[in-house]
Image (cartoon, grey):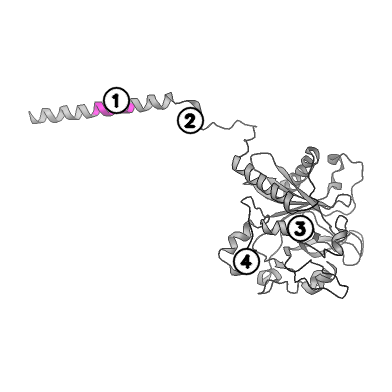
């Protein structure tokens, strides 16, 4: 009798389990299609993320409030900037694997502007606006044509800040005290002196300049090879950490990076780490221009090579001696203040 009862209980349990499994299968098949994630269709672009859209809108609003004379694109001009940026990134191996901001500079002498571009791996890109810049004057002793390409801003090199002191000509080459100097390392660039097409090395920097004197020249090719930006744009990029995705991580473990970043910053979650320099003269068909291509144009430069002691930055976060090639940089910050 006991054996029969046990067999009956086992059979009953198996029946109950079978009924539960059948019910679960029926329930799952009855769920509406919206309950399961839809598979992407080949060739389609994913819809923009509401979170990314909200962050981009907040940053765009801050840009309009904090940067006077902000340049805002028409749909056609925004499309051109985006196409140029994508064309520059495509051959270089730089991956857009998440929504992130790029600083895009056009060294075309007839443009001399920059844009903050939101790049996405699976949704349309967006231009948030920008300002005028000054890139390298292609003619003159120890002047360089600003190189084109994608230049990562990584924690292999520590940036520095302007001291804001005047030189003998009463000019602050890097701007007022505390202005950020983004350092992209040594780059090969076409020289503005010597045999045509000659190439040398320069230290590629992104920085402000004297607001009372040199800032009025922003908008034309006038630098020694670096990219000058207005004081307000310098402050915006710095406060919102537009190029500081790597720096924010480094600051968690390295006191020198933590000391460089502003204590009152409001970093965006969309921060990136790439400066993209283009030349719209290189593709006149894209911009609808009949202007002939510029001569002796640079190609995309190789990534900056690290040097010793945080790539030419001393323990106080200031530029040390940087070598013998580019005069505004070769003797460090003191010489750069004179002419940068």
Magenta span has 273?
no
Range drawn in magenta: 14-21
Q: Is residue 68 above or below residue 174?
A: above
Residue bearing mark 2? 35
Mark closer to the chain start, 4 or 1? 1
Q: Residues within 10 Å of mark 3 (few under 14, many from 20)?
A: some
Task: Name which quarter of the figure residue 9 lies in.
Answer: top left
Determine the secondary structure under disc 4: helix
Residue 152 percent across, percent down from the top left: 69, 57
Q: How far is disc 4 from disc 1 in space, using C-alphas?
A: 62 Å
Q: Is residue 222 above or below residue 129?
A: below
Residue bearing mark 3? 232
Residue 13 percent across, percent down from the top left: 22, 29
Q: How far is disc 2 from disc 1 in space, using C-alphas?
A: 24 Å
Residue at the image position 63 percent from the left and 55 percent from the top = 267
Q: How far is disc 3 from disc 1 in space, using C-alphas?
A: 70 Å
Residue 318 percent across, percent down from the top left: 71, 72
Residue at the image position 63 percent from the left and 68 percent from the top = 259
Determine the secondary structure under disc 1: helix
192 displayed left or right of 36: right
Q: Look at the numbered discs 3 and 1 and tell me whether their residues touch, using CB distance below 8 Å.
A: no
Q: How far is disc 3 from disc 2 in space, using C-alphas?
A: 48 Å
Residue bearing mark 1? 19
């Amino acid at each position: 009798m006991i054996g029969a009862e046990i067999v009956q209980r086992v059979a009953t349990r198996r029946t109950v389990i079978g009924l539960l499994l059948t019910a679960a299968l029926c329930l799952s098949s009855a769920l509406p299609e919206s309950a399961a994630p839809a598979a992407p269709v080949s060739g389609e672009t994913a819809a923009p993320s509401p979170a990314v859209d909200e962050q981009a809108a907040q940053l765009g609003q801050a840009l309009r409030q904090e940067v006077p004379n902000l340049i805002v694109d028409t749909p056609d001009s925004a499309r051109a900037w985006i196409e140029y940026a994508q064309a520059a990134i495509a051959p270089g191996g730089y991956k857009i694997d998440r929504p992130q901001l790029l600083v895009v500079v056009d060294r075309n002498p007839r443009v001399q502007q920059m844009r903050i571009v939101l790049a996405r791996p699976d949704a349309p890109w967006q231009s948030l606006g920008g300002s005028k810049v000054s890139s390298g004057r292609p003619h003159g002793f120890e002047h360089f044509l600003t190189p084109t390409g994608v230049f990562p801003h990584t924690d292999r090199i520590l940036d520095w800040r302007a001291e804001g002191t005047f030189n003998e000509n009463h000019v602050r080459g890097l701007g007022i005290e505390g202005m950020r100097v983004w350092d992209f390392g040594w780059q090969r660039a076409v020289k503005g002196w010597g045999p045509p097409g000659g190439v040398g090395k320069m230290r590629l920097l992104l920085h402000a300049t004297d607001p009372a004197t040199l800032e009025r020249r922003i908008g034309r090719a006038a630098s020694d090879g670096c990219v000058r930006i207005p004081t307000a744009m310098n402050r915006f990029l710095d406060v919102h950490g537009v190029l500081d995705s790597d720096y924010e991580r480094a600051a968690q473990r390295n006191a020198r990076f933590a000391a460089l970043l502003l204590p009152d910053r409001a970093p965006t979650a969309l921060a990136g780490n790439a400066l993209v320099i283009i030349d719209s003269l290189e593709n006149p068909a894209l911009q609808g221009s009949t202007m002939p291509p510029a001569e002796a144009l640079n190609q995309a430069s190789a990534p900056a090579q690290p040097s010793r002691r945080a790539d030419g930055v001393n323990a106080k976060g200031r530029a040390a001696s940087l070598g013998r090639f580019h005069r505004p940089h070769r003797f460090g910050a003191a010489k750069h203040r004179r002419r940068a």
